[in-house]
Image (tube, grey):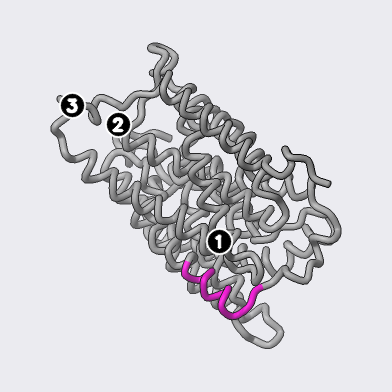
């Protein structure tokens, strides 16, 4: 017989979290100067940042949400838990990131503006990627605990990588995609069991694949905004958009080629089409504001698409059967390996491009 606490543990836990978050926002949060009355009259930040934020927002709630509906018996839970975890992590991420900022260190307050809204979506993306590896394996309470633990760890590592070691990772391929994927795989290895690896409900049906493709297309269309969201100055932002778009296009074409080439019946695999077509956006993310040659961006997409399909075809079974790390959504192939590839390519492009080409604002 379940105890009263066990019956109501989700309601109790989430209520406590929300109360604590609101208290912390009340004590330490404030809007930035541009948001307050008599703030900046410059409309450029709003005109530039808000569309990028909204595009990223669509990716988080519609893109990731619908992409995870591919399981034939987990559609409602996938899209609703996705929404819950995104909102939960946005709140928690704003608090954690704010308390690591210089404003909080100097004045005991953290500011909230368009920039913080955008970066909070990045924090949500980390957790949702990890959720993909654990999809269908945890209860809502367990997902909340995972998000609560993962968010400060991810933000702290991002702070060290970007601000301490000054690594250029404008699209978050390392600190968002790779971290989220391998954190999720670690959770899967630690908390998974044999029954989850060969479950009868693991798989898709015709309609669930269509819904997953809706999510994939939303992600594909808006990915340039994700990679360009925090890119500065304007020319770097435009490079990020162009490079991401070209990488995605080349990645998509390559995915169809490799998907059919590796299939015994020479058919396309919908898992590849819905996921591997996005790998180009991940792989170019770290250097989206750096690459100066369109051919280089397309080469990144080609490599990422081929790598992702090969991962789904040959590496995922090894992770599942040999290493015991069951990956429900294949985040290792969409986010993990392309994220690692992005980090390696950043070393290559540092050697290819002369810093003088970027002028005095060169940031690498």
The residue under label 1 is 304
Which mark is first along the chain, 3 or 1? 3
**Main SS class of the magenta portion in the image:** helix
The residue under label 3 is 37
Q: Which residues are magenta?
A: 204-214
Question: In the displayed structure, would residue 154 be above or below residue 139?
Answer: above
Q: Nearer the viewer, mark 1 or mark 3?
A: 3
Which mark is first along the chain, 2 or 3? 3
- Label 2: how many Cα within 10 Å (few below 14, some 14–19, many 20+): few
Q: Residue at x 54, y 63 (%)?
A: 67
Residue 300, image x and y in percent?
50, 59
Q: Nearer the viewer, residue 356 or 201?
A: 201
Mark 1 → mark 3, Cα distance in angstroms: 47 Å
Q: Is residue 182 left or right of residue 105?
A: right
Q: Residue at x 42, y 63 (%)?
A: 218
Q: Nearer the viewer, mark 1 or mark 2?
A: 1
Q: Residue at x 77, y 65 (%)?
A: 317
Q: Are marks 1 and 2 in contact (CB under 8 Å)?
A: no
The residue under label 2 is 360
């Amino acid at each position: 017989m379940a105890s009263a606490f066990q019956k109501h543990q989700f309601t109790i836990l989430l209520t406590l979290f929300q109360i604590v978050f609101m208290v912390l926002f009340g004590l330490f949060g404030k809007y930035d100067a541009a948001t307050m009355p008599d703030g900046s009259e410059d409309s450029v930040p709003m005109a530039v940042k808000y569309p990028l934020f909204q595009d990223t927002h669509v990716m988080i709630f519609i893109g990731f949400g619908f992409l995870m509906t591919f399981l034939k018996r987990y559609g409602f839970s996938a899209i609703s838990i996705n929404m819950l975890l995104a909102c939960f992590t946005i709140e928690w991420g704003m608090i954690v990131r704010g308390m690591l900022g210089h404003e909080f260190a100097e004045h005991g307050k953290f500011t909230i503006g368009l920039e913080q809204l955008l970066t909070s979506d990045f924090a949500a993306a980390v957790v949702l990627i990890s959720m993909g590896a654990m999809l269908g394996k945890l209860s809502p309470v367990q997902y909340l605990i995972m998000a609560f633990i993962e968010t400060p760890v991810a933000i702290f590592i991002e702070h060290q990588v970007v601000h301490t070691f000054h690594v250029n990772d404008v699209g978050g391929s390392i600190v968002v995609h790779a971290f989220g994927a391998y954190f999720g795989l670690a959770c899967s290895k630690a908390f998974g069991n044999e029954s989850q690896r060969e479950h009868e409900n693991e798989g898709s049906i015709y309609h669930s694949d269509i819904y997953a493709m809706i999510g994939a297309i939303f992600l594909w269309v808006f990915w340039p905004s994700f990679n360009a969201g925090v890119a500065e100055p304007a020319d770097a932002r435009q490079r990020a958009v162009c490079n991401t778009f070209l990488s995605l296009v080349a990645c998509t074409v390559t995915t169809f080629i490799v998907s059919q080439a590796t299939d015994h019946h020479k058919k396309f695999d919908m898992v590849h089409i819905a996921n591997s077509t996005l790998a180009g956006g991940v792989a170019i993310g770290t250097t989206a504001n750096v690459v100066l040659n369109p051919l280089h961006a397309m080469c990144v997409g080609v490599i990422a698409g081929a790598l992702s399909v090969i991962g789904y075809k040959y590496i995922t079974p090894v992770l599942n059967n040999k290493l015991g790390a069951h990956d429900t959504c294949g985040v290792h192939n969409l986010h993990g390996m392309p994220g690692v590839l992005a980090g390696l390519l950043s070393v290559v492009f540092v050697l290819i491009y002369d810093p003088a080409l970027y002028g005095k604002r060169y940031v690498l």
